Image (cartoon, grey):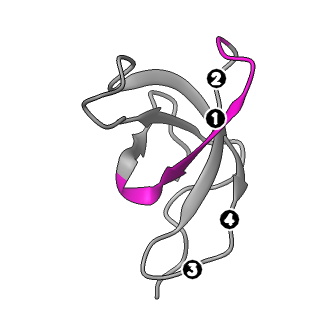
């Protein structure tokens, strides 16, 4: 498997499942890269507008506006 696509501290856009009302929301930041399990990395992401962190699969994320790659 290749390296993780995103890095800790990188701004990302979360492309949530269609049942979530915040679909495609900007303003998330990667706080942790989870250990690889299966075929896809998972990340802990945080928005300052939310009190909690989320776990998102790599396929649910896209680079944010000031993406660092």
The answer to whether mark 2 and mark 1 are in CB contact below 8 A is: yes
**Crowding near pointer 4: few (<14 within 10 Å), some, many (20+)?**
some
The answer to whether mark 4 and mark 3 are in CB contact below 8 A is: yes
Considering the numbered disc 1 on the image, is that residue within a helix, a strand or a loop?
Answer: strand
Write the residue at 44% across / 27% down. 65
Considering the numbered disc 4 on the image, is that residue within a helix, a strand or a loop?
Answer: loop
Residue lying furthest top in this view?
49
Residue on which disc 1 sits:
29
Q: Could you tell me residue 51's position as x and y percent?
A: 75, 18
Label 1 vs 4, first from the N-terminus? 1
Residue lying furthest front in this view?
19
Vertical placement of residue 44 versus 23, above or below? below
Label 4 vs 2, first from the N-terminus? 4
The answer to whether mark 1 and mark 3 are in CB contact below 8 A is: no
Q: CA distance from mark 3 to mark 2?
A: 24 Å
Q: CA distance from mark 1 to mark 4?
A: 14 Å
Q: Could you tell me residue 6's position as x and y percent?
A: 55, 56
Write the residue at 29% across / 28% down. 19
Q: CA distance from mark 2 to mark 1?
A: 6 Å
Vertical placement of residue 6 versus 20, above or below? below
Q: Could you tell me residue 29's position as x and y percent?
A: 64, 35
Label 1 vs 3, first from the N-terminus? 1
Residue on which disc 2 sits:
47
Residue on which disc 4 sits:
34
């Amino acid at each position: 498997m290749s390296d993780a696509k995103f890095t800790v501290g990188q701004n990302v856009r979360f492309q949530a499942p269609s049942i979530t009302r915040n679909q495609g929301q900007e303003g998330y930041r990667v706080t942790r890269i989870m250990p690889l399990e299966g075929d896809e990395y998972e990340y802990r992401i945080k928005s300052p507008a939310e009190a909690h962190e989320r776990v998102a699969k790599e396929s649910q994320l896209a680079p944010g506006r000031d993406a660092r790659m």
